[in-house]
Amino acid sequence: MRIIFMGTPEFAVPSLEILYQNGYDIVGVITATDKMGGRHGKKLLESAVKKFAQAHQIPIFQPKNLKDPDFIADLRKLKADLQVVVAFRMLPEVVWNMPPLGTLNLHGSLLPKYRGAAPINWAIINGEKESGVTTFRLKQVIDTGDMYFQAKVLIDENMTAGELHDKLMPIGAQLVLQTVKAIEAGTVQAKPQAGQPTHAPKIYHKTSQINFDNLTENVHNYIRGLSPYPTAWTTFQDKKLKIFLTEKEITKDHEPPGTVVSDKKTFFKIATKDGYVRLLDVQIQGRKRLKIRDFLNGLKWDT
C-alpha cells in the first residue's frame, strides 16, 4: 500500500514511524514549512516529522498553500492509495478526497467529544476522567467524519496536558497501524459519530490568565490543562508568573480569592473561592522554570 503521511509536531512522529517500521511504502511526507525561532528568532526550525523523513530518505513536501496547482499535481504523481493525517492543517477537499481509500485522521480525543485544535488541553481543563484517541475518515466539516477505531486512557486528578499528550502518542500510533491494516484488508467499516459533540478551540497564552475567583478544583484543572503549553499565568510583583504544577487545598478558612500566602521559604499558595492552590513549579518573567523552594529561595519580597 502506498501512503502519503501528513503531520508536523512530535505527536505525529510515532504514527509515521510505526507505519515505516511495518513496511508500508511511505511515498511522501507533507509537513509545515520551516520557521525561524529559538533564541532571538535566528535559528531555522524544522518540524519533528520533517526530521524523521530526512533521516529515512522519505520525499518531503512543504507547501505554503495546500491548493497550489503545482502541489496538487505533485500529490497526484505520488499515486497514493491512502493518506494518513496526524496533527496537521485543515485540508481542502481536492486533497483529502484524492486517494481511492480516502484520508485517515488520528484525533486526540474520544470523538465526538472535543472536536477542534486543542482536545488534550480541554479534556484536562474540564476535569474529564478519561480521554483517548480516535481514527476517522476525513470529510469536509472538521473532525466530523465516520470513525474507524477508538482507544481510551484514564486521566488522574493531577495529570497535566503534557503528560496526557505523551501517554496518547504511542497509543495513537498503534491505533493508526491497526486502522491502516484493517483498511488494507477490507475488514473495517467506518461508523458515524454518535453523541453530543463538544468543541476544543485553540488556546492562546495571552488569554490564559488565571481567574482565582473560581473553585479550587477548577483553578487546578485550568493550570494543569495548560501545562506545559501554552501555560496558565498570573501576575506577581508586577511580573508575569507562569504556573505549571499545583496541589489543591480546599478549606473554609481562606483569604479572598487571588491573595498570596507564603512562609517565604517552603510554600506559596494563592487563595481561590473555596481554598487555595499550592504552587509547585513556576517560572517568573525573566527567569527559568523552578521548583517552588528554589523560586522562593531567590525571591526578593516587597516590604
Image (cartoon, rainbow, N blue to C red):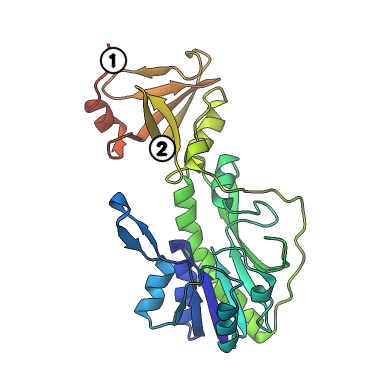
Q: Is residue 175 visible?
A: no
Q: Is residue 84 visible?
A: yes
Q: Is residue 92 left or right of residue 285?
A: right
**Residue located at (50% from left, 71% from top):** 15
Q: CA distance from mark 2 to mark 1?
A: 24 Å
| Horizontal and vertical percent position of residue 7 | 51, 68
Secondary element type, mark 2: strand
Residue 117: quarter of image: bottom right
Instruction: Report the front residue among 261 and 142.
Output: 142
Amino acid type at image mark 2: Leu
Residue under label 2: 245
Amino acid type at image mark 1: Asp
Instruction: Report the front residue among 199 and 111.
Output: 199
Q: Is residue 16 left or right of residue 218?
A: left
Q: Nearer the viewer, mark 2 or mark 1?
A: 1
State the mark number for residue 89. Answer: none
Residue 142: quarter of image: bottom right
Q: Is residue 76 left or right of residue 290?
A: right
| Horizontal and vertical percent position of residue 224 | 48, 40
Quarter of the image that includes the N terminus:
bottom right
**Residue located at (62% from left, 85% from top):** 81
| Horizontal and vertical percent position of residue 180 | 60, 78
Quarter of the image that includes the C terminus:
top left
Task: Please say if 126 is above or below 38.
Answer: above
| Horizontal and vertical percent position of residue 283 | 33, 36
